[in-house]
Image: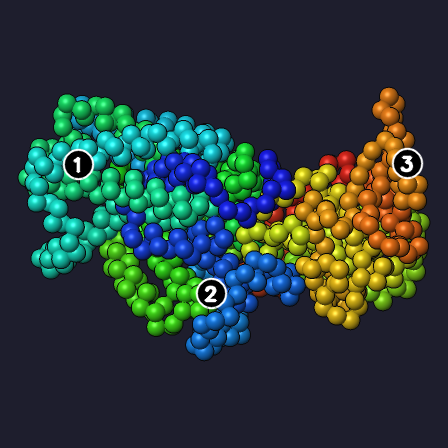
Amino acid sequence: MDIEAKPRNSDPIKKESWRTVMTLAYQSLGVVYGDLSTSPLYVYKILRADDNGEGGTFALYTLLCRHARVSTLPNGQLADEELYEYKKDEITSGSRDIGLSLKSTLEKHKILQKALLVLALLGTCMVIGDGVLTPAISVFSAVSGLELSMSKEHHQYVEVPITCIILVLLFCLQHYGTHRVGFLFAPIVVTWLLCISTIGVYNIFHWNPQVFQALSPYYMYKFLKKTKKGGWMSLGGILLCITGSEAMYADLGHFSQLSIKMAFTFVVYPSLILAYMGQAAYLSKHHILETDYRIGFYVSVPEKIRWPVLGIAILAAVVGSQAIITGTFSIIKQCSALGCFPRVKIIHTSPTNKHGQIYIPEINWTLMLLCLAVTIGFRDTKHISNAAGLAVITVMLVTTCLMSLVMVLCWRKSIFLALAFMFFFGSIEILYFSASLIKFREGAWVPVALSIIFLVIMFVWHYGTIKKYEFDVQNKVSINWLLSLGPTLGIMRVRGIGLIHTELVSGIPAIFSHFVTNLPAFHQVVVFLCVKSVPVPHVRPEERFLVGRIGPKEYRLYRCIARYGYRDVDMDDVGFENDLICCIAEFVRTERSGQTSAGNNSVTGTSDNLLSEDSDNDRKMAVVGVASANSEGSIRMCEEETGFSPEIAVVVAAPPPVPRKRVRFVLPASPQMDTGVREELRELMEAREAGLAFIRGHCYVKAKRGSSLMKRFVINFGYDFLRRNSRGPGNALSFPQASTLEVGMVYQV
């Protein structure tokens, strides 16, 4: 991922003030509830199943991955399970034998883990498909109100061009971000809700005050009993009343639980109930419309205010598309961070610390092109509505299945309660799903086709990523080979730091042997850097880095693993470099000063430092917090003009007229420091001032000879195409091109 972020070093885990909640609730009216649909009450309660503020089907999947080892991430470590996000989710009481048995079954069978991943990806793909269909049907339906002023022959030539123009403008607004769009759209939604609720109250009292009885579920039973097959088939159209509820959950990461609940309870739900009852009251007295092609909503509006309502409706339709667009951004970011989608450029748009508010240019323009294709291809709302209905109900069905697993594995509820939950809501959703699926040839094939395309992309990327990692593991360099080279590695060691990017969490990557055997010189300090994602929303700054040593101390080889959650904002290059070097220095200080216990699983002196055993027995690795979050009692980097002790300070002559500066590590107060520690810190500081080079491999992945035809096609064409057209792994760190060195390697997987 390529991250552009405004906030830095702000802690995303903090309690929000009421002012912040009210602001987010107001913004959510313009984003989450822009779809203007009644969300069923069970979705409203599903909001409790968020993953630390992040919603969507993939967030439920990551929640399951933390409570059972079902994650398909190839570079996972036991040390990751010591993260705060893992620990705080642990439930010691209320555990049940059936839940533990289910967890054990999932962890033992790879086929079940893959099936769970496919289920989560299917829901994700349907959300993306919904992101294509909802803007099309929302804007098209609003613009179709022009039918009231022209004949059937003429309005068809006006609706499509106007709809396409509005859609292009909508997607062009996305780069301003959820923060600005929410404030821009919220007044439109408030006006629209006030408008339709007022019209609804007028129609209720003017045409049929007894329509309030329709709130009773008894009449739903009577309706289905009387209409039978016709009533069952009509359920596919009724789904249009609940479109947007799936986006309400996916958009959770852009706001908060409380803000979404407040907006729904006090504004959205009452207004829409009045609007639907008003339309029902009007239709109860007008069974036959004058012209069959005119839509019912505008006919139910009093004639004197139809044109103003049409204008508000077009604006509201634009807003209605916002919920699913922002929800698509969120769910794509989750998939990309966890290796299930090609790397994309992610821009954080919030001026505050609301890290869930993002914009993805590639996805935005892809959605726009697909949306225009659907609009121009169908040219009527009937087929688009059939497609949107199937996408919505599929997302709900997948969410219900994952929720049942969350109840057992994460919340440790009774298996019978989970089955009752899935049976009750699942049976309703299957009823709607079957009613939508029967219209497959009448437009419902579109979300299926889109989902298959995106599912193939995700599968190919995930499969290729795993095979590439397996190749790295199989071809990593032996530690014995490194030890045989001696402290100089058999070459000239020059000043500076060589930062070698690798996806390995243990062992020495094959790329390093290429350097040692083909170059006459290398840096005096070498850091093997792995930047990886873990299945949690956030990694606390004090748990960011895992630092260890490879080989003897005089080799000056370090391993550093930087861990990020799928909602974290990666730091800029300068901040990342400083924190990385300071964490290595802190590791050197605690290790050499006797604070690191070689035989225990903890580091004394730092309460939240943990150790993990490297699989190659290079050395143990310690969790070291970044300097910005762990300034007390740790090493920091400081730069001033005078006043430093010459024992640790390194004088650097800057070009004139800039005055000379002294750069040093600011050490915490300690009784004494070992001479070896001072020497190693001095050498590390000198290497930092000499410069840092970021070295990464530019891989060419191809299938091995003798591989099956399917594997050759997936790797040689599918994965290679996606890799060449996606962001590179090192782009997430935003290192300057002048400091970056790429080395080509051929991977035969």
Q: Is residue 36 above or below residue 466?
A: above
Residue that mark 2 sits on: 410
330 lies above or below 615: above
Q: Is residue 293 left or right of residue 421?
A: left
The residue that appears at 29% across and 30% down in the rendered structure is: 191
Please tell me how crowded label 1 is: few (under 14), some (14-19), or many (20+) other residues with Cα within 10 Å. Answer: many
Rendered image: mark on residue 651: 3
> Marks 3 and 2, how far apart in space?
55 Å
In the image, what residue type sits under mark 1?
Answer: Gly
Residue 433 image position (x, y, % from top left):
28, 57
Return the x and y of residue 139 as percentages of the image width and height. Answer: 31, 33
Q: Secondary structure at mark 2?
A: loop
In the figure, is residue 527 to the left or right of 384? Answer: right
- Neighbor class of circle 3 (other Cα within 10 Å; few <14, some 14-19, many 20+) is some
Q: Secondary structure at mark 3?
A: strand
Tell us which disc is closer to us: 1 or 3.
3
Percent coordinates x, y for residue 329 in the rendering: 48, 43
Residue where numbered disc 1 is placed:
200
Q: Secondary structure at mark 1?
A: helix
The image shows residue 741, relative to residue 462, as above or below, that is: above
